[in-house]
Amino acid sequence: MKQRKIPMRKDIVTGEMVPKQELVRIVRTPEGSVELDPTNRANGRGAYLSLDVKVAQQAKAKRTFDRVFETTLTDTFYDELIAYVDHQQARKELFADEQ
């Protein structure tokens, strides 16, 4: 059987190409708001971030998404992002043990 192609995306903080499943998408909607996109289907311009808390903390320290989306984001957005990434990373580790 032919192997399926794994979609790759670039992590906006580290610059590494990573399988899309190991990233979270952050999107700027056409209305101008910036939000998390766990479904990877929201309309707007997207950027990807690794599911790694250290990388999310780097993004907050460097205000990466402020520059990428040319807007000013609150610390609350970055805190929510770090919490989401931490949760997803914990889920990934938990369910990896079951397989």
Image (cartoon, rainbow, N blue to C red):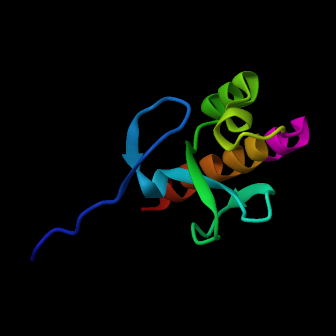
Instruction: Give 50 or 91, whichever is nearer the viewer.
Output: 50
The residue at the point 46 percent across, 58 percent down is 21
What secondary structure do most residues of the magenta stretch adopt?
A: helix
**The residue positioned farthest toward the top in the image shown:** 61
Above or below for 54 versus 76: above
**Number of callouts:** 0
User: In the depicted view, which residue is nearer to us: 33 or 62?
Assistant: 33
Say which quarter of the image contains residue 54: top right
Residue 97 falls left or right of residue 72: left
Q: Is residue 70 magenta?
A: no
Q: Nearer the viewer, residue 76 or 30?
A: 30
Q: Residue at x 45, y 32 (%)?
A: 15
Q: Is residue 21 above or below residue 55?
A: below
**Percent x, y of residue 77:** 84, 44
Task: Locate the C terminus and report the quarter of the image it occupies.
Answer: bottom left
- Looking at the rendering, the stretch of residues picked out in magenta corresponds to 73-80
Based on the picture, tell me whether residue 79 belongs to the magenta stretch: yes
Point 54% across, 37% down: residue? 12
Where is 20 relative to 77, above or below? below
Task: Residue 70: name its quadrant.
Answer: top right
Task: Establish if 37 lies above or below 74.
Answer: below
Residue 96 horizontal/vertical position (percent)? 47, 55
Quarter holding residue 44: bottom right
- 16 left or right of 65 in image: left
| Figure quadrant of the N terminus | bottom left
* Rendering coords of residue 31 (x, y %): 80, 64
Q: Residue furthest bottom?
A: 1
